[in-house]
Image (cartoon, rainbow, N blue to C red):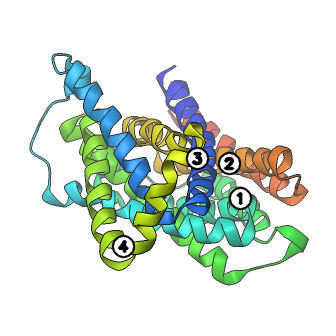
Amino acid sequence: MQQTLYLGISALSGMVIAIMVVANTLLGQATTMGVSLLVNHIIGLTLLSAILLLGRRRPAIKGPGEKAPWYLYFNGLFGLAILNINYVTIVATGASLAMASAVFGQSASSLVFDLTGWMGMEKRRLNGFKVLSLLISGVGIVIMATAGEGGSFKIGYILLSALAGVLTMTQMVLNSTFAVYKGAIRAAQQNFIGGLGGGALFYLLLQRTATIEGLLKIPSLPPLLVVAGGLLAVFVVVATSYVVVKIPAVYSALLLSASQVLMSLAIDTFFFDAFDLALLIGALLMLLGMAGNLYSDTRSS
């Protein structure tokens, strides 16, 4: 029952990530990408700080408060690179192809975590059935990565999106490890502190004029566009911090990946009047491969 809950949260997180990435990109187009990052992190940090203040006497919110490795405190810096890469690739290729490319990076890095036990993940072995299931998922990823508008294969943007996927999965694993020491809410708060500090330093030093001009546009924008990315980011960071170490990273990545692509397909279809059958087939193959992995675990337990 618990594993079903964890898998469900992973799938929901993937859907929310797809919506969040598009919301961040739209806010970046209306202002600048730096403004999008700063606004989202300020909103997220404010909300998480309020939750910690109001729930400071609740152990589930306060967390264990144990001493954590120093490098985990800088995990939020990954968001600076991820947000900018997502912005570039979505504007250039559309949400579906960008998400399809990113999921390859997520899935590849999650497999490395599971096989090596790197970054605190439980080390797991593969059997023949799991290898076959992963190959099926891999075919789905390749189909998605080679799909896109007009069937174009934009290798540079695909590699960039794959890098964003690797960074995203790495950040999730580190967030989840940090949550073991500090609790999910406090780990998420530190993530936003690191991202906000790094982003403010980067954009105000290198893009000061554009960032200030973008910030001045905020009052004229729809409130939902301004707050959506930050609120959704809080859910994603907290949810993934809670579940990533509870299930094999490859399952988490495949669920996150498939749900991201399915949601991005829905966004492209209903909001941008675009649909790609190859992406849908690829996502379904990924789900089929993941189901094979789950069946293998159930049969061996």
Which sits earlier in the primary sequence, circle 4 or circle 1? 1
| SS for callout 2 | helix
Is 285 left, or right, of 110 in this rendering? right
Which mark's residue is nearer the viewer, 2 or 4?
4
Q: Position of residue 220 (x, y in %)?
A: 56, 47
The residue carrying mark 3 is: 221
Q: Give, as a three-letter code, the residue at label 4.
A: Arg
Q: Give, as a three-letter code, the residue at label 3.
A: Leu
| SS for callout 3 | loop
The residue carrying mark 4 is: 208
| In the depicted structure, whether residue 90 falls above or below residue 280 | below
Which sits earlier in the primary sequence, circle 2 or circle 4? 4
Which sits earlier in the primary sequence, circle 2 or circle 1? 1
Separation (CA) of disc 4 from disc 3: 21 Å
The residue shown at (42%, 50%) is 39
Q: Give, as a three-letter code, the residue at label 1.
A: Ala
Is residue 169 visible from the viewing direction of this image?
A: no
Is disc 2 in contact with disc 3, using a CB cutoff of under 8 Å? Answer: no
The residue carrying mark 2 is: 258
| SS for callout 4 | helix
Q: Give, as a three-letter code, the residue at label 2.
A: Ala
Separation (CA) of disc 2 from disc 1: 14 Å
